[in-house]
Image (cartoon, rainbow, N blue to C red):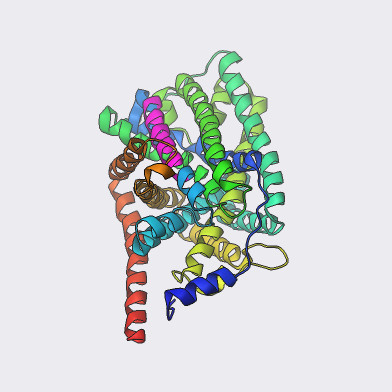
């Protein structure tokens, strides 16, 4: 990870093969929406309802506001720095290499944990008794699809997104037009209160975080200064509207206690309204939606790995771009292998917990980097970035203590490894 000089590192970086710009606004919106409309909309409601109770939709609104602030910061930074790597690149340039490493490490850790979480959902729906095995196979399948290039990824994502949206549409229709509602009697403790609402926002944020996928495509979108600022708000706005409708339906038909106890709330709405025939369809839809998120997360994380490897924060061999396919195959393979290890080592809850802390840290640094933009470079008022930064910090603090300890421990370990590597490098040069 050591380099003799910054000039040598820059020349090495420039000499590497480049990714190809081939995605327009519609492609970017599809990728962004496909990265969000996944397991979150099918599974995130229960823990959020346990925290907020009947005020769940307020928590969703708070999560949406923070996500919007983060999205605007990501978009304007991506427009100024159209490179793969997202906030790892932005923070390195605007805040310094150390902060860039924290952002990059946070993204890689958080999103790899998200891949594992999505794979676990797929495994639970397909074969619960062998969920880890199915989850591992699902990751391999996603990696193979991505080897076909971004055009194939976008094409498959379109199909998966249609299936997921159709499934959600069936559930909404059941909630609005079905027969008498069957009650779900449960006895569960609801946290409630202001703090509970904020905690629910922190948990619900997990379902929004996929829009960063658009920013990581900086080297692969056509006219990034125009495409990214347009694609990010469109994808996020559409998904926020969808989540609001789904959230209203599930809490109105299951109640806060019933929702808090449900592992499959969208499917339960269909069941309680008498649409038994639709339950298998919803199960398939949840599986497909999770696969769609994985399909976009793997290449997104891989491109951040490429950016970090280019700067020496990861082994430089991971910066290799396959000349024939113009894809970072080594990085994608590495991400897939690590995700498989996480699937078999951590539970779904632990994966989501680590992801929440790491990803919110990543977005806090995104907003901090946006605050370093000059007035002539900004596309939105500075107070939006301030609101996003403060919001991320508050949501991190609201997460369960065990989540904070686990997430912070992983982040600190990455920082410590880089510190030791830089120190060793400095000693060698001296």
Q: Main secondary structure of the magenta part?
A: helix
Q: Is residue 204 left or right of residue 137?
A: left
Considering every residue shown, the one lying at the far front of the view is 376
Q: Is residue 131 left or right of residue 423?
A: right
Which residue appears at 50% of the width and 29% of the height? Answer: 243
Residue 73 magenta: yes
Which residue appears at 47% of the width and 58% of the height? Answer: 108
The part of the chain drawn in magenta is 57-74
Is residue 332 placed above or below 235 in the rendered structure? below
Q: Nearer the viewer, residue 391 or 396?
A: 391
Which residue appears at 51% of the width and 42% of the height? Answer: 211
Which residue appears at 42% of the width and 78% of the height? Answer: 5
Is residue 418 placed above or below 168 in the rendered structure? below
Is residue 315 placed above or below 170 in the rendered structure? below
How far from the left and from the top, in percent, is residue 14? 56, 69
Residue 71 magenta: yes
Instruction: Report whether residue 19 is seen.
Output: yes
Tell me which corner region of the image, top left, top right, bottom left or bottom right, holds residue 3.
Answer: bottom left
Q: Is residue 274 left or right of residue 353?
A: right
Instruction: Report whether residue 186 is seen.
Output: no
Report the label total.
0
Tell me which corner region of the image, top left, top right, bottom left or bottom right, holds residue 106.
Answer: bottom left
How far from the left and from the top, in percent, is residue 27? 65, 42
Q: Nearer the viewer, residue 12 or 42?
A: 12
Please identify the quadrant where the N terminus is shown. Answer: bottom left
How far from the left and from the top, in percent, is residue 119? 56, 51
Q: Nearer the viewer, residue 53 or 291?
A: 291
Is residue 105 placed above or below 5 in the rendered structure? above
Please identify the quadrant where the C terminus is shown. Answer: bottom left
Q: Nearer the viewer, residue 21 or 240?
A: 21
How far from the left and from the top, in percent, is residue 282? 62, 33
């Amino acid at each position: 990870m050591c380099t003799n000089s910054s000039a040598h590192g820059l020349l090495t970086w420039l000499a590497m093969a480049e990714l190809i710009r081939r995605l327009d606004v519609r492609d970017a919106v599809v990728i962004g929406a496909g990265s969000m409309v996944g397991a979150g909309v099918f599974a995130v409601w229960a823990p959020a309802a346990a925290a907020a109770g009947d005020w769940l939709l307020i928590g969703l609104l708070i999560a949406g506001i923070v996500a919007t602030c983060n999205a605007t910061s990501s978009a304007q930074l991506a427009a100024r720095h159209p490179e793969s790597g997202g906030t790892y690149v932005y923070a390195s340039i605007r805040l310094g290499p150390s902060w860039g490493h924290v952002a990059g490490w946070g993204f890689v850790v958080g999103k790899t944990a998200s891949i594992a979480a999505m794979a676990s959902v797929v495994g639970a729906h397909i074969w619960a008794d062998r969920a880890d095995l199915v989850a591992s196979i699902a990751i391999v399948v996603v990696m193979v699809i991505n080897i076909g290039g971004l055009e194939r990824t976008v094409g498959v994502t379109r199909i998966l997104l249609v299936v997921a949206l159709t499934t959600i549409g069936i559930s909404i229709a059941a909630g609005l037009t079905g027969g008498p509602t069957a009650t779900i009697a449960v006895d569960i403790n609801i946290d409630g209160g202001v703090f509970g609402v904020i905690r629910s926002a922190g948990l619900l944020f997990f379902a929004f975080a996929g829009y960063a996928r658009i920013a990581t495509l900086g080297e692969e979108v056509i006219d990034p200064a125009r495409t990214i600022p347009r694609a990010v708000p469109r994808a996020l706005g559409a998904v926020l509207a969808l989540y609001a409708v789904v959230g209203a339906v599930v809490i109105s038909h299951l109640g806060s206690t019933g929702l808090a106890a449900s592992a499959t709330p969208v499917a339960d709405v269909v069941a309680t309204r008498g649409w038994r025939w639709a339950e298998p369809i919803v199960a398939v839809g949840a599986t497909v939606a999770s696969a769609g998120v994985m399909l976009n997360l793997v290449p997104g994380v891989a491109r951040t790995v490429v950016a970090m490897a280019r700067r020496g924060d990861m082994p430089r061999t991971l910066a290799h771009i396959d000349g024939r396919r113009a894809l970072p195959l080594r990085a994608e393979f590495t991400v897939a292998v690590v995700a498989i290890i996480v699937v078999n080592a951590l539970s779904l809850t632990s994966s989501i917990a680590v992801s929440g802390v790491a990803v919110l840290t990543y977005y806090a640094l995104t907003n901090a980097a946006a605050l370093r933009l000059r007035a002539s470079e900004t596309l939105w008022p500075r107070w939006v970035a301030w609101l996003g930064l403060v919001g991320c910090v508050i949501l991190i603090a609201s997460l369960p203590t065990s989540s904070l300890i686990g997430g912070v421990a992983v982040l600190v370990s990455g920082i410590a490894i880089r510190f030791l590597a830089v120190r060793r490098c400095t000693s060698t040069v001296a």
